[in-house]
Image (cartoon, rainbow, N blue to C red):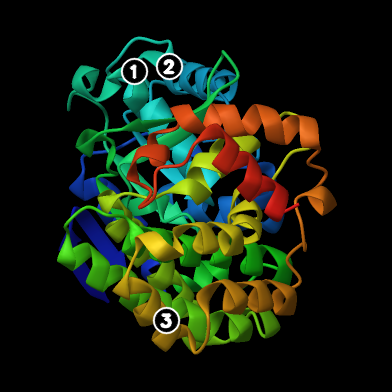
Amino acid sequence: MSRINYLTRIEFGEGEISRLPQFLADLGVERPLIATDKGLVASGLVDRVKGLIGSRAVVFDKTPPNPTEHAVMDAKAAYDQAGCDGIVGLGGGSSLDLAKAVRLLTGHEGPLEQYAVIAGGAARIHSKICPMIAIPTTSGTGSEVGRASVIVTAGGRKLGIISDFMLPSLALCDPELTYGLGPFLTAATGMDAIAHCLETFMAPAFNPPAEAIALHGLSLGFGSIKAAVTDGTNRAARRDMMVCALEGALAFQKGLGAVHALSHPLGAIREPILHHGTLNAVLMPAVLRFNRDAIGPKWAELTSRLGGQPDQVIAELNAALGIPASLNQMGVTEAMMRAVSEAALEDHCHFTNPRLATKDDYLAILMAAA
């Protein structure tokens, strides 16, 4: 077992899930809402977690792939009706982001859009919210240690609600919970974590500790993702991928970039439903090429660590992992791309890309990834 204090408390290690009752008691939580999804219910993991807590736990299992304000409000209603006093987010980034948004509403009135960072919402968020434990079951978003909840609001926009107060009270990271994750989701969520490390390293803000963490996470993720996809029970690979996801999110407090500025509005599209990590993987080579001249010696650093030209290496890795070859293959049309290229200009990640993109630049990136 390892305890890490960086932004928030992290309990990391195989088998740590067994200590959940102790962690809830530490936070004074007696009746938690478990925010999760139907896939984890079917897997039996939700029953396992509920068994650790006891009959006082309440389950909300209707988290959609891209969490919506409507689902958040339904979960908050379940929280209120049951008289809950804390939240356990259990699942991938969608469940954790939904849990964070529900937590926000335990001390704030809706609607959610007023708390989005692009609307100046951070100043409206305070600390008087319930405790939360975040338990990731994928190694991807790192939402368990992130300040953001990314939600498709009632108005149809996928927006980031960002504040230090949004950090979970505790992140419980147990690599054993990822052993049952299938090859495709292991690949897609793993590439999400790798994208976080790459984008954070490239972001222009001065933050050497974040860059060091991002590079360490990148090395672990790049070195382990194929093994994790090939053999889901590979303990070392699963552990390394969970660290990669954790470090990517610890580091991206520094900022992300054009990949996420595009994947957020793409994720707001209602049909087809597009997986966030898969989008990041498909977009990454084109964004790397777009940023090359703006990041100077960082390109050489990435080339050294990845063993080749970064854009080419990531494209080859995507192919080896079975990631879709293009946005078109995922069902994204040119009309969607044109709308997304305009929406990206309003995403909070747009402003932290090392090279500020125009609408035409974004469209060109999308077309290159098509």
Residue 351: quadrant of the picture: top left
Image location of residue 343, percent across then percent down:
55, 27
Q: Which mark is residue 220?
A: 3
Q: Earlier in the sequence, mark 2 or mark 1?
A: 2
Would you say residue 63 is visible in this rendering? no
Q: Callout 3: few (<14), some (14-19), or many (20+) C-alpha neighbours within 10 Å?
A: many
133 lies left or right of 220: left
Circle 2: residue type:
Glu
Q: CA distance from mark 3 to mark 1?
A: 36 Å
Q: Please give the residue where the numbered disc 1 appears in the rendered image.
A: 119
Look at discs 2 and 1 and give the one toward the viewer.
Answer: 1
Q: Quadrant of the N terminus?
A: bottom left
Front residue of this view, candidates 280 and 149: 280
Q: CA distance from mark 3 to mark 2?
A: 36 Å
Pointer 2 with pointer 1, Cβ within 8 A: yes
Q: Callout 2: few (<14), some (14-19), or many (20+) C-alpha neighbours within 10 Å?
A: many
- SS under mark 1: helix
Q: Earlier in the sequence, mark 3 or mark 2?
A: 2
